[in-house]
Amino acid sequence: MKKRFNPKTSQKIAFTILLLSALVTIIPVVVIIIVVIKNGISAISWEFLTSMPKNGMRAGGIFPAIVGTFYLTIGATIFSLPLGVLAAIYLSEYAKENRFTRILNLGIVNLAGVPSIVYGLFGLSLFVIYMKLGVSILSGCLTLAIMELPSIITATKTALNSVPKQFREVSLSLGATKWQTIRYAVLPYALPGIITGTVLSNARKTGETAPILFTVAAFYLPRLPSSVFDQTMALPYHLYVISTQIPGIEKNITYGTALVLIIFTLSLNLVGIIIRTRLRKQKKW
Amino acid sequence: MNKIGKVKEFFIEKLIVICGSLSIIFVILIFIFLAREGLTFFKYESIKDFIFGRNWYPLSNPARFGVLPLILGSVMVTLGAMAISIPLGVACAFYIAEIVNPKMKDILKTGIELLAAIPSVVIGFVGMVTLVPMVKKIFHLPTGLTALSGSIMLAFMAMPTIVSIAEDAITAVPKRYKEAALALGATHWQAIYKVILVAAAPGIFAAIMLGIGRVIGETMAVMMITGNAAVIPHTLLEPVRTLTATIAAEMGEAIRGSNHYYALYAVGIILFIITFVINFIADIFLHRIKK
Amino acid sequence: MVNNTKITVKNFNAWFDENQVVKSLNMEVFSNEILGIIGPANSGKTTFLRTLNRLNDIEDKFRMDGEIFLDNQNVYKDIDVNLLRKRIGVIFALPISLPMSIYDNISFGPRRHGIKKGLDEIVENSLKSAYLWDEVKDRLNESALNLSGGQQQRLCIARTLAVEPEVILFDEPCSGLDPISTAKVEDAMDKLKQKYTIILVTNNVKQAARVSDRTAFFLMGELVEIDTTEKIFTVPSDKRTENYVSGRFG
């Protein structure tokens, strides 16, 4: 018979390996954040944040990229939030368990799986060219919004499902219609969950570069956009440009830009995570 | 309720139904608009030459649009990434779901969530300045921009997907399976790999599929650290160019309405179909678990 | 006493998926009576109750046939469902206060029916009829979740009264309450029957004996017997009823 480890020993070894795997998984986060902060912090100044880039981006600040990313984040949410919430209301309150619903859910899964660069192609083809919106903030926002839809739908569905079924029964039993029930006895209690879900997923999508490459992002545009039909610089694309296309750029400008981008997405995320943890603890019903 | 209210409610409910169908509408729209541009390409070129062509020289005269090196580039980077992220991700999922104490669990989960939140362009940038020189030095290569560097970075980008979905699958395994194993005298570890791993296998498989989908679709980090040489790769230590990076790098300079432009849309169609199939398979497995 | 029929049930059957939970039920409910429905778990009592105001409609797996009439109108054909639910209110087993103020809880129903004026009065009257007014009149704007279980159940009664129903269904309304709170709810019920028709589903046989005028005994989806409460509890005509009320099973 083959000689084997005693089960207790092999359990010890196995658990140690699992622990190491878990640590290896989150080490990159720590490394990335530390590297970026350490090298980027010296570049951060009021001037860097609020002035226009100069000298072919080799000097000056990143103000238009910050503003552009801010506009894109807000703009995309304006489109994606209402559509996503209504879609989730349909799926969790109205849809019956049948083949059509199954197809809709498959649609969400696939929409979430479409590569971001394909969204870029789609946005270019539909919004920029076919709808003649041009390379513009509007095209960029719409492209991002569609990309955000699946995660908003999923987050909203979860939030709606966590509202007790009894609330709906009480409201219906008082003679309220289905929509009144959703509007007055369900949505108010799902709202915090919907908001956190949206903040979390949109913070993530804001850092995406591929979908804005051909739909909105300007390589070098040292002024603020004047309307939704204007192009704009954006932080992620700007970081890509200065780290790969501008030889001889001072390293701390690149790191500084990366740091601002990380702070932007991570702080939104942290806020979302904190609110979510609070809500989970507070929930009364 | 009065009449106006009824009418209002009628329209709101219609709107809700329409929005509910948006997901599938957009999937179809994406396909239509990719096809609109991409299929034009095949008016001039044969599908066979496109898929099996070994040369991608879009700017030479005559231009050559063979997508094989790009497909192999994507495949190689993906295989490399999966070789790292599958064992690591599944192990991490088991650790989180089965072993860790609640406080550490929160830390790990938050860490993984933050990993998912770091923009891919930042991951690419940090990879460029840290990992790439390291790879160059260790393997004595002319350049560190290789498939290997891409695989390592991508492995971490796939991790959040794999860990969270695998963890769900593990948590969904009924407690009584584990209890039965423990009652029969198995150690916790034996219960994990003999009982829970088997029971959670379909969900873990789905997690892996979705991880693959995530990696194949990743663009920016890959473009920044794989070197972008459109040649058929032989080892992980050569520069490669993926499908996604090709679109991202070339669409800017492709002239609208040119063959090059249409060819990039055709590449987009390939990507769309690959990820569609992967997600479809993953969903079938996830759906089976729910039942 | 003249018995006016309020609700008529004809050949009613109900299923969840393939499980038949109510079998060919025929019965009548009279105006201004308290009808107690007793029976062991899974005897179809609650399903029947929830069909009267069509709350089962929201269950995907629910299926039924047969006819139910409210004042000679078929509840599935002749009456708008929201209006039906306004006319037939229901009090659930566990008091479900919506997480809003007491005032908003009570005015929730009337507001949904488009009433904007006189809400103060409706709130006051409803709370008085449910014997809760004196306990909460000074804190109407506080969260309803701060009330005790018994108070919450009376709040639910008041909330139902606020939409001026004709029939009130009680679905084991005291299952989560202590004896004192239970007595208060039963008291309220007794006074309410002056104005309303009441159907009380209960697992507590003694409660049916205490408050109902007539009692129906359900067993495995069938109506075994319906008669005056006194008869059911003293000289039931069916052996199974006798066994149940004397506590031999269930």
Image: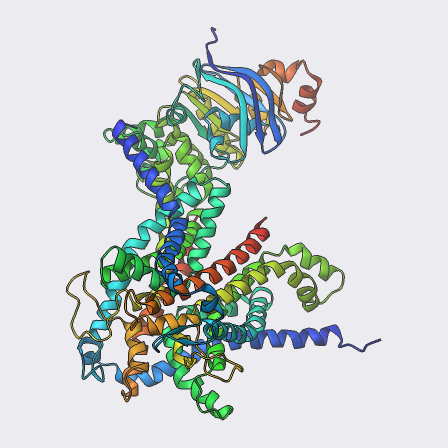
Residue A274 visible? The answer is: no
Question: Where residue A147 appears, x then y in whole percent?
Answer: 36, 59
| Residue located at (49% from left, 37% from top) | C94
Which residue ends up furthest to the right in the rendered image?
A1
Q: Nearer the viewer, residue B131 or B54?
A: B54
Which residue ends up furthest to the top in the rendered image?
C2
Quadrant location, the N terminus of chain B: top left
The correct choice, above or below, for B215 with respect to B148 in the image is above
Question: Where residue B184 appears, x then y in whole percent?
Answer: 76, 61
Q: Is residue A184 left or right of residue B269?
A: left
| Residue located at (25% from left, 81% from top) | A44
| Residue located at (60% from left, 19% from top) | C24
Q: Is residue A182 left or right of residue B162?
A: left
Question: Where residue A95 appears, x then y in whole percent?
Answer: 44, 41
Which quadrant would residue C134 be assigned to in this image? top left
Label tally:
0
Which quadrant would residue A168 be assigned to in this image? top left
Q: Nearer the viewer, residue C166 or B205?
A: B205
Which quadrant would residue A91 be assigned to in this image? top left
The correct choice, above or below, for B250 with respect to C184 in the image is below
Q: Is residue A239 left or right of residue A91?
A: left
Q: Nearer the viewer, residue A202 or A10?
A: A202
The correct choice, above or below, for A115 with respect to C115 in the image is below
The correct choice, above or below, for B263 with respect to C215 in the image is below
* Display colour scheme: rainbow
Residue C46 visible? The answer is: yes
Q: Nearer the viewer, residue B96 or C153?
A: B96
Q: Is residue A257 left or right of residue A159?
A: left
Question: Where residue A196 appears, x then y in whole percent?
Answer: 37, 58
